[in-house]
C-alpha cells in the first residue's frame, strides 16, 4: 500500500475520526477531505500536471496540515516553503523557484509583494481559508499558469524537505514515495488504540514530516501547536501517555525550568534528544528529576533520519557514554576521516564524520556521504560530535573553535546565551566575534569584561575582537542558532 492509498482510505472510511488536535479543537478526516476536493478542482481547472508539484507554505495549523495530506493523497509532490522568513525572503525564494501552484494560508497571501512576484512567475494561487466547509479558493489574479519555465521536482518525490539553514539559505531535499511506504506498520490498529502523535518539532522539519507520515499510517491524530508551549506539550504527554519522548534538547531545559511535575511524563521510558547537541549537565538534571534516561541521536535531513543512536541494548551505557550520540544504528555505517586525505582515522582522533545511511534523498548518489561535522569515535563505536568544520576559523595561522569559545562565554554566571562566528579580517584572515544574551538585561557587565573572561579560559587568539549584547539569538524552528544571521549583525555595522 502507498501513503496516498492510506490517506484516501482515511478520507473515505473514517471521515468522523480525529485527524488534527489544535488547541481545544478537533479537525476530522472528513474536514481534510473537503480541502482535498477543493484543491483537486482548482488544480484540474488550471490544467496543472501531476508531475509539477505543489508549493505549500506549511504553517502549524490544521488547514495547512490538511493541504499537505491532500497533496500526498493526490500523489503529487509537496514542495515546502517555510513561513518563518521575512516577506522579502519568501518573495525571493518563490521568484527563483517559480512553482506552477502555491498553496498558502490567508495570512501569507497578505505578505508584501507576494502576489506580484507570483503573477510574474505565472503561478496559480490557492488560499487556505480556515473554513471547514469552504476550505480553499483561488487567489484573484492568480487563476492560471503563465508561460516560461517552472519548477519540477525529482520524479516520484512525495515532498521536498528544507534543510535547517543554520549556515546559509535552506536547501530542498527530495524524499520519494517509496521512503514513505517503508514506514507502513505491520498492522493497522483500531481507532481507540491509536493514541496521538505529539511532536515538539515543526511540520517543516524532517522530524515533523516523518512524524506526520507515521501518524497517517497509524490513523492517529496529529497534535499541532502554532507556537511551541511546554505546558501544552506536557499536558498532551500526560493525556496520551507515549512510551517515548522525542524532542530537541532545548525542550528538556524548558521542562526543567518550567517545573513540570514528574507525573506528567510518567508514561515515558526514555527521552530521545536529537537535532542539536545535548548539554550533559542538563541530561543529568533531567534524569535526576524525572527518572527517565536521556538518549541522544545524530542524523541529518540529507540522511532522511538518524544514523547513530542508542538502541535498547545500549541503554545501560547511557551514563558511561554521556555526551555521545550513540553508535551506528542497524543498517547505517559511520566513520571518521581525515579532512584533507579522506583516510579513516583511528579511535579517539577528531576528523570529519561520514555516513552511509540505509535511505537517502531521491537525487543522492550511493556510497559514503561526507558531513561538515567534526567527530571522534571510541573503540566501542560510540560517536562524539565535536563541532562543525565551518565553526573552526583560522586567525593568523591559529585555529579557533567558535563553539568552544561560545561554551566559555555561556559558563559566565551573567550570560544566558552566546553565539560566536568568524568575520573576515585583512590582517588575520578571520577573527571571532560574539553575540551575547545576558541573564539580567540591566547588569553592568561590559564587553571588555567578557573578553577578559574568555582570556582567562582560552588562548589569546580565541578572544573575540568584538562582543555585542542582544535580546535574543536568531534561531530556526528547531531552536538552532542561525550563524549566517548572527554574522549579518556584525557585517551590517561595519
Image (spheres, rainbow, N blue to C red):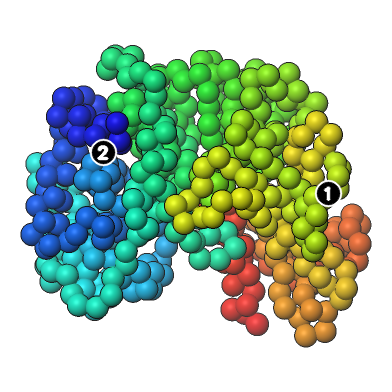
Task: Read off the residue under disc 1.
Answer: 345
**Can I make out residue 451 in this image?**
no
Using the image, determine if residue 227 lies above or below residue 10: below
- The kind of secondary structure element at disc 2 is helix
Residue 317 is situated, as x and y percent measured from the top left of the image, at 75, 23
The image's mark for residue 4 is 2
Using the image, determine if residue 344 lies above or below residue 237: below
Identify the residue at horizontal 63%, vertical 32% (top origin).
329
Instruction: Say which of 482 and 381 sits in front.
Output: 381
Identify the residue at horizontal 42%, vertical 40% (top origin).
179
Using the image, determine if residue 306 lies above or below residue 392: above
Identify the residue at horizontal 12%, vertical 45% (top origin).
37
Instruction: Say which of 436 and 367 sits in front.
Output: 367
Identify the residue at horizontal 30%, vertical 36% (top origin).
3
Q: Which image quarter is the N terminus in?
A: top left
Residue 68 is situated, as x and y percent measured from the top left of the image, at 28, 46
**Can I make out residue 73 in this image?**
yes
**Distance between mark 2 and mark 1 Cα atoms:** 44 Å
Circle nearer the N terminus (2, 1): 2
Instruction: Say which of 102 and 343 sits in front.
Output: 343
Using the image, determine if residue 300 lies above or below residue 332: below
Q: Residues within 10 Å of mark 2 (few under 14, many from 20)?
A: many
The image's mark for residue 214 is none
- The kind of secondary structure element at disc 1 is loop
Residue 72 is situated, as x and y percent measured from the top left of the image, at 27, 44
Residue 377 is situated, as x and y percent measured from the top left of the image, at 79, 40
Amino acid at each position: 500500500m502507498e501513503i496516498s492509498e492510506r490517506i484516501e482510505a482515511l478520507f473515505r472510511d473514517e471521515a468522523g475520526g480525529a485527524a488534527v488536535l489544535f488547541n481545544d479543537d478537533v479537525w476530522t478526516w472528513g474536514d481534510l477531505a473537503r480541502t482535498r476536493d477543493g484543491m483537486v478542482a482548482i488544480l484540474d481547472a488550471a490544467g496543472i500536471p501531476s508531475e509539477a508539484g505543489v508549493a505549500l507554505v506549511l504553517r502549524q495549523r490544521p488547514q495547512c496540515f490538511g493541504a499537505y495530506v491532500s497533496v500526498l493523497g493526490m500523489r503529487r509532490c509537496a514542495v515546502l516553503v517555510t513561513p518563518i522568513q521575512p516577506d522579502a525572503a519568501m518573495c525571493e525564494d518563490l521568484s527563483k523557484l517559480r512553482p506552477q501552484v502555491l498553496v498558502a494560508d490567508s495570512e501569507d497571501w497578505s505578505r508584501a509583494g507576494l502576489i506580484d512576484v507570483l503573477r510574474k512567475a505565472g503561478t496559480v494561487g490557492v488560499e487556505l481559508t480556515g473554513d471547514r466547509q469552504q476550505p480553499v479558493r483561488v487567489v484573484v489574479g492568480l487563476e492560471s499558469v503563465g508561460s516560461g519555465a517552472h519548477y519540477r521536482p525529482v520524479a516520484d518525490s512525495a515532498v521536498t524537505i528544507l534543510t535547517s539553514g543554520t549556515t546559509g539559505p535552506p536547501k530542498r531535499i527530495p524524499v520519494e514515495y517509496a521512503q514513505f511506504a517503508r514506514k507502513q506498520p505491520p498492522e493497522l490498529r483500531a481507532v481507540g488504540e491509536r493514541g496521538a502523535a505529539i511532536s515538539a518539532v515543526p511540520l517543516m522539519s524532517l522530524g515533523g514530516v516523518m512524524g506526520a507520515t507515521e501518524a497517517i499510517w497509524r490513523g492517529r491524530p496529529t497534535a499541532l501547536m502554532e507556537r511551541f508551549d511546554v505546558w501544552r506539550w506536557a499536558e498532551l504527554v500526560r493525556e496520551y501517555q507515549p512510551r517515548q519522548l522525542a524532542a530537541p534538547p532545548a525542550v528538556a531545559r524548558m521542562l526543567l525550568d518550567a517545573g513540570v511535575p514528574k507525573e506528567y511524563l510518567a508514561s515515558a521510558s526514555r527521552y530521545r534528544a536529537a537535532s542539536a547537541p545535548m548539554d550533559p549537565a542538563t541530561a543529568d538534571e533531567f534524569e535526576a528529576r524525572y527518572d527517565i534516561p536521556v538518549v541522544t541521536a545524530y542524523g541529518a535531513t540529507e540522511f532522511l533520519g538518524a544514523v547513530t543512536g542508542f538502541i535498547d541494548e545500549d541503554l545501560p551505557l547511557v551514563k558511561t557514554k554521556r555526551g555521545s550520540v550513540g553508535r551506528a544504528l542497524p543498517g547505517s555505517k559511520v566513520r571518521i576521516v581525515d579532512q584533507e586525505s579522506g583516510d579513516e582515522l583511528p579511535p579517539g582522533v577528531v576528523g570529519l564524520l561520514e555516513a552511509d545511511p540505509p535511505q537517502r534523498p531521491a537525487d543522492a548518489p550511493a556510497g559514503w556521504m561526507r558531513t561538515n561535522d567534526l567527530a571522534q569515535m571510541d573503540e566501542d563505536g560510540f560517536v562524539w560530535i565535536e563541532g562543525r568544520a565551518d565553526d573552526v576559523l583560522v586567525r593568523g595561522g591559529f585555529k579557533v573553535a567558535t563553539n568552544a569559545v561560545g561554551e566559555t562565554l555561556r559558563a559566565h554566571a551573567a550570560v544566558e546565551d552566546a553565539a560566536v562566528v568568524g568575520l573576515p579580517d585583512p590582517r588575520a584572515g578571520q577573527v571571532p566575534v560574539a553575540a551575547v544574551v545576558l541573564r539580567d538585561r540591566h547588569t553592568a557587565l561590559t564587553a571588555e569584561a567578557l573578553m577578559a573572561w574568555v582570556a582567562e579560559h582560552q588562548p589569546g587568539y580565541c578572544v573575540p575582537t568584538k562582543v555585542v549584547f542582544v535580546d535574543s539569538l536568531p534561531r530556526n524552528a528547531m531552536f538552532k542558532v542561525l550563524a549566517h544571521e548572527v554574522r549579518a549583525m556584525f557585517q551590517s555595522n561595519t
